[in-house]
Image (cartoon, grey):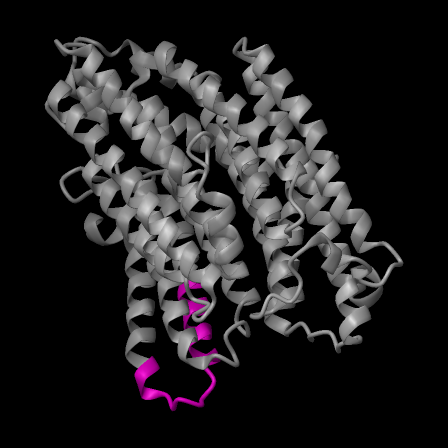
Amino acid sequence: MSPNVLALLPEYILTLAGVLIMLAEPCLKHSSSRKPLGWIAIAGTLLAGGASWFQLGFGTVHAFSGTIQTDPFSIFFHLLIAAIVLVTLLTSLDYFETYATHAGEYFALVLFGAVGMMLMTCSVELLMVFIGLEISSISTYIMAGMRKGQSTASESSIKYFLLGSFATAFFLYGIALAFGATGSTSIVAIAAGLGTTATPLIAFTSLAMILIGLAFKVSAAPFHVWTPDVYQGAPAPVTGLMSTGPKAAAFAVLLRITFSGFPSMQHRWAILIWILAALSMTIGNLGALLQRDVKRMLAYSSIAHAGYLLVAFTAFPVEAISAAAFYTAAYAAMNVGAFAVITQVGGFDETARTIDDYTGLAARRPVLASVLAFFLLSLIGIPFTGGFFGKFYVFSAAIGSGHIWLAVIGLINSGVACFYYLRLLFAMFSRRTPATELTAGASQPRATSVPAVIGLTLAALASLILGILPGNTLWLAQYAGTSTMVEDARQQCIAHPDNCQLQVQMERR
């Protein structure tokens, strides 16, 4: 098989499935169900996940003149993104059922967004990263406004687009400065050029600009201002997707750029990451304490979790990459699961928005309440959940590299987070009747479809397995970190044969 085909096989499959949905959608009657289009999207996602697993047996594959590199690192995030998209599609298969004209667009945009996310994770050329970033961003800009006729949806889409475009400008300017300082936009070539550049200040400025652009994508403070409004106005399944998938892809890019592109400047950019992590954890958790809207609360929670994940970047390279990769997987499982429950409870009209609307949910829908409670406990970091082991791994890596105070700040913020998670948890298991039912009368709860049950089960099992049997995922994360550092060191050694000490050290390790 051609390297150009093998390296982007999952992306090809998702693209073909998305195009097939766009071609098939106009052929359906206006009143017909769009569920078959959803099943095409699910089948395409499964095939893409299988193709990613197939790639694992080929080691590192370089394609398209070295701009694409498929390795265990990119494959880890390919599998994670495919899993996120699969759960999102399963739990939202019926979401647009009474609004059939929207469903075909939604299913195709989810797949096209996934193509961009996967392309970001396997690109080792900054311009290719930018292309993947834009493919992912444009899809999510549109999906954020899918609830047509709702003012909050329009506000969400426009605000996300405007601020996202502003962040993209920072990212592009950073690429331009990196080229000016090192003469290349290849991540490996940038790392090699830093040792001979005559303008190290411009090189560091380029990294700072790139960091600003990616910090927006991961909702890191102080670049988080868009997050609460966009999460609140976007459809619940879209919010669950954009809070996990694009964030995972952006963190993968940030890991490559910092540890592979600018490793010699770690003593400088680690300070910036330290500040971003502390601000994100603190602002996110304090902001969540003030929220009564559940989606806004989880938006601030995602800001805090971005801070927890950034803590891993302060560790030594291999430990940092493996810790960040594992925490990204744990966070994705519990957060996409939480928004999947919100999707089932509120429906397209989002009848359950505030904490008061969830009062007594355990009495009305005990299974959904129990599943949401489990995800909330995992977000807190209770033992035997993925959230606990993820935080343990991240904080341990930070302490091992000497950043004890950052780990202390993280632990304190984890304690603060208990208040707003437990507030929602107590409301769900309260015996009181929500005000909406007292005024409008009790309504028949929506039935949860079989695909939604499967999606919720997959998310819950993933969070549970990552908490009690993390071995396989942890091994893959560590393998991804080690193989990435070794391969980048080898590429730098090829470019500069006189400086191969890093490769020797990594291969011995």
Towards the viewer: 382 or 488:
382
Q: Quadrant of the N terminus?
A: bottom left
Q: Residue 21 placed where, x, y %? A: 34, 74
What is the residue that sits farthest to the front in this orientation? 439
Query: Quadrant of the rendered structure where residue 483 is?
Result: top left
User: Closest to the observer: 239 or 21?
Assistant: 239
Magenta residues (range): 25-47
Classify the position of the C terminus by image quarter.
top left
What main secondary structure does the magenta stretch of the protein show? helix
Q: Residue at x 36, y 48 (%)?
A: 117
- On whether residue 34 falls in the magenta region, the answer is yes
Is 227 placed left or right of 51 in the picture? right
Name the image quarter holding residue 493: top left
Residue 32, relative to residue 330: is it above or below?
A: below
Position above or below: 105 against 379: below
Q: Position of residue 384 (x, y in %)?
A: 74, 38
Q: Does residue 307 show up magenta in the picture?
A: no
User: Residue at point 42% right, 33% down?
Assistant: 223
Residue 180 position (above or below residue 87): above
